[in-house]
Image: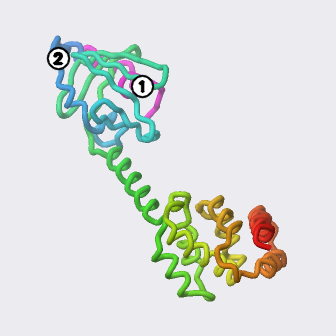
Amino acid sequence: MIRYSLIALIMFVFVSCKETKEKESSSLEQDKTQVTFDKKLLNGAWAENQEENALFYIENDSIYYIDNQDKPYSLEFRGSYFSIHYDNYTSKAELIKLTKDDMIYKSSTGIIKLYRTADQVKESKTETQETLLVDNNKKCDMEKVTVLKQQLPSASKESILSFLSTISVDCKNNAEFGQFSNEVLFEVLKAKPIEVLMIVEKENVEKDEVYKMLENPINDAINLNKLIDSINKLELQSVEKSKFLEALKKALEKYN
């Protein structure tokens, strides 16, 4: 399938052989009527043919494209005409046919026919939202902090990653979590310094929040000089090592 940019409901133009297109165009013109279409029939997923994945999903006044679902296009529909708006761009087209199974419309690029298909786009969008919800639920999780503390000093990489993933700017108003996770962060850094550094460097954690915790230890009994020395001795050259040392030295300046 050859995809071109088109802002006439789909932003895609499909190229077929000239003879087939001429025959289809001729028959499609016969389907054209002067009626007002039911806008609700536009809702759903649409594809070039029924056996292919959906190109986009229409939901009320929005169009979600499979490759850009976070930025919906705005759809305005009046009678048999519709227009699509995105930022400062607008395109118009005329609807010729709209049923529960297919649609035909005419734009500046010609006559386009699309088929209703399974809601892959909506399902994909829903899955993305659910994934984000799961990720958000990992934040500020006291249970994960407790699990890691119980494993120390022999914590697994998975438990360390799970713990570091709970640290977030979203937890700034959670005093109980902030104090507990601060305490455990220094404990795990003391027990598994290289593992902590490598995870922060390579995994998807909120690094800035980790650094802020390191700059502000809650436990006065932490030996910052010894911790700095142990990290300095690591045979590891990385940006994260430098940032960890910088944060710990700031803490040392504050509390010494």
Question: Quadrant of residue 214 in the image?
Answer: bottom right
Residue 20 seen in the current view: no
Q: Amino acid at mark 1?
A: Val
**Frontmost residue, 230 versus 86:** 230
Query: Which residue shows up at 49% across the image and 20% down it?
Result: 88
On the picture, is 82 further left or further right than 34? right
Query: By what rule are the colours in the image chosen?
Result: rainbow
Residue 145 seen in the current view: yes
On the picture, is 228 further left or further right than 149? right
Residue 111 located within the stretch drawn in magenta: no
* Magenta segment main secondary structure: loop
**Frontmost residue, 224 versus 200:** 224
Crowd rating for badge 1 (residues with CA inside 10 Å; few <14, some 14–19, many 20+): some
Spot occupied by residue 90 in the image (x, y as percentages of width and height): 43, 18
Local secondary structure at mark 2: loop
Q: Amino acid at mark 2?
A: Thr
Instruction: Using the image, determine if residue 34 lies above or below residue 97.
Output: above
Local secondary structure at mark 1: loop
Query: Which residue shows up at 35% across the image and 19% down it?
Result: 83
The magenta segment is: 1-26
On the picture, is 70 further left or further right than 46? right
| Residue indicated by mark 1 | 13
On the picture, is 199 further left or further right than 109? right
Spot occupied by residue 228 in the image (x, y as percentages of width and height): 80, 75
| Residue indicated by mark 2 | 36
Query: Which residue shows up at 37% across the image and 47% down it?
Result: 125
Say whether disc 2 or disc 1 marks the residue closer to the N-terminus: 1
The mark closer to the camera, 2 or 1, is 2
- Find the distance from the CA under tag 2 to the CA under tag 1: 25 Å
Instruction: Using the image, determine if residue 35 lies above or below residue 17.
Output: above
